[in-house]
Each structure stands twice: as structure tokens, then as C-alpha cells.
Image (cartoon, rainbow, N blue to C red):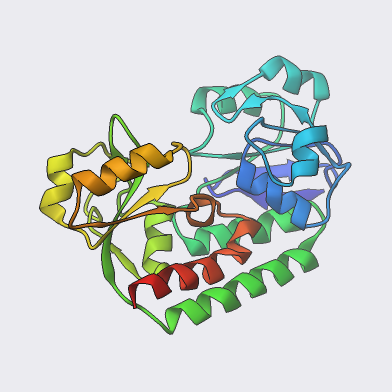
Amino acid sequence: MISTTDQLGRILQLAKQPVKIISLVPSQTELLFELGLDKEVAAITKFCIHPESWHQSKTKIGGTKNLKLDKINAIQPDLIIANKEENEESQIRKLIEDFPVWISDIKNLDDALGMVREVSKIVGKENKGIEIINEIKSGFMLLAQKRNNINCAYLIWNKPMMTVGGDTFISNMLEYAGYTNVFNEKSRYPEITAEDLEKKAPDVLFLSSEPFPYFNKLIDQYKSDFPKINVQLVDGELFSWYGSRLLKSPSYFLNLREKFE
């Protein structure tokens, strides 16, 4: 018997180590791959693009917020890995009635490392999980030695313009990367206006590569609309994916920081 507690404080009892896992979250899917799993992962979402081999070959059970419950039922998984924010609560509640569902809730780096630690234990890859955690910690320790505290705004959507509040994982990553989120007083993913942005007057405006695709013409438009702000397109995965992709985030943050020194 495997006993585990997810990040909502729910206790799960698994009869054995899972061999039919469904991942409903792209960053956690990539983590399962990095832990060394393969055939144990029975299905993923259409947004689970890493690794590419899994994206091409694994069964898809819909999108993160639009799951195909009939496909999941047909697989009869012995573990589903979900996330409080990325998945729809009503669908997760239905799945909980029939299957063990481990739910993550990630607001900062410590939460992310806790998720890696617990998931690796559940799937029988605890040693590999510890290795990943230690490498992530080492990378972020290097970041901590060098802080710029540049004022920034981070946009995730256009029309309506949406940013990130101080209680989000992305804002925590901005802090580690050496930036001060000018919308830190807001929560979650609020809508803002051009006037809000001008009033805050950040040194830099980050346009995330996901979930909204900021194409070149739109980036140029932002640069034209806000000539006093340094507008940069950034890799959204390295700011928002909270699994093993965090192994790559510190070096990316350091390279990005060099542009402002």
C-alpha cells in the first residue's frame, strides 16, 4: 500500500505502484519523462508537447480544461496527476469519484520542488527525483547571488490585456530572476489597461510566448505604444512550467538579466 498526500491536503491510498498513469498537466508530463517513465504513462493532454516523442505517440485525452472523460474511463488509470489551477474543478471532481487523483497546487519554487519530491515517490523514482531537485536548487542558488530588482510587467494575454499577480508561480520566478513585478499587489491573472501599464511605468515589459502567441507585428505594436518601456518576448515555459523544465530556467534567467547590465 502506498499512502500519499497531495498539495490540497488530500490523502490517497494506492494499492500498488501505478502502472497506468494519466497526466493532465504539460509540465508534470515532462517531469514523468525526466524521471525515466515511459510505458507507465498511458495518456496525456494535447498540450503536453514535451517530450516530442510522447506528444506524437501517447494517447490524448483532450485539453487541460476540456478533458475527454470517456477516454479516461476507457483507460481505467491507477493514477491521475492533475493541477488545481490548470484543470477544471468540475471535471476533476468527477474523476475523483472513480480514480486516485493527485492534485498539485503550485505558487512558488518550494511548492514545485515538493511536487517533484512527492510524485517521484509515488511512481517509484524517488532517487531520480532527489537528483532533479538538487540540480534545480543548485541553479536557483546561483541566481540568488545576483539580483537586479528591475521593475517589470509580465503579460500573458492580449485583448484583454492580462498580467500576473504577486500570488502566482510566474511572479515568484520573476523575483528569482531579479525582477520586481509592478503588479505584485494584484492576485492571480488580472486584466489591465494600457493606462494601468503607463502608470506603473515598468523598466521592462515581458510578453510571454505562451499561452498567447505574440507575433512579431504585435510585439512591434507594443514597442510603438510604450516607447519608454523595454519590450521583450520571453520563453513562457521557463517562467511558468513547474516541473523538470526548472532545470533550464536559471541559465535562461541569467542570460536574460545580462541584457539589463
Residue 11, percent from left and from top: 63, 45
Question: Residue shown at 46%/37% (left/top)?
Answer: 213
Residue 104 visible somewhere in the drawing: yes
Which image quadrant: the C terminus? bottom left
In the picture, measured across the screen, residue 94 lies left or right of residue 204, that is right
Residue 241, percent from left and from top: 55, 51
Question: Residue shown at 37%/48% (left/top)?
Answer: 207
Residue nearer the viewer, 258 or 251: 258
Q: Residue 170 lies in what quarter of the image?
A: bottom left
Residue 14 visible somewhere in the drawing: no
Residue 183, percent from left and from top: 23, 53
Residue nearer the viewer, 86 or 226: 226
Residue 76, percent from left and from top: 81, 25
In the picture, measured across the screen, residue 194 lies left or right of residue 19, that is left
Question: Residue shown at 32%/76% (left/top)?
Answer: 148
Residue at the bottom extreme, as displayed: 145
Q: Looking at the image, is 209 positioned above or below residue 258? A: above
Q: Residue 243 lies in what quarter of the image?
A: bottom right
Q: Looking at the image, is 91 positioned above or below residue 256? A: above
Question: Residue shown at 52%/58% (left/top)?
Answer: 111
Residue at the top extreme, as displayed: 70
The number of numbered discs placed on residues in the rendered structure image is: 0
In the picture, measured across the screen, residue 101 lies left or right of residue 41, that is left
Residue at the right extreme, as displayed: 39
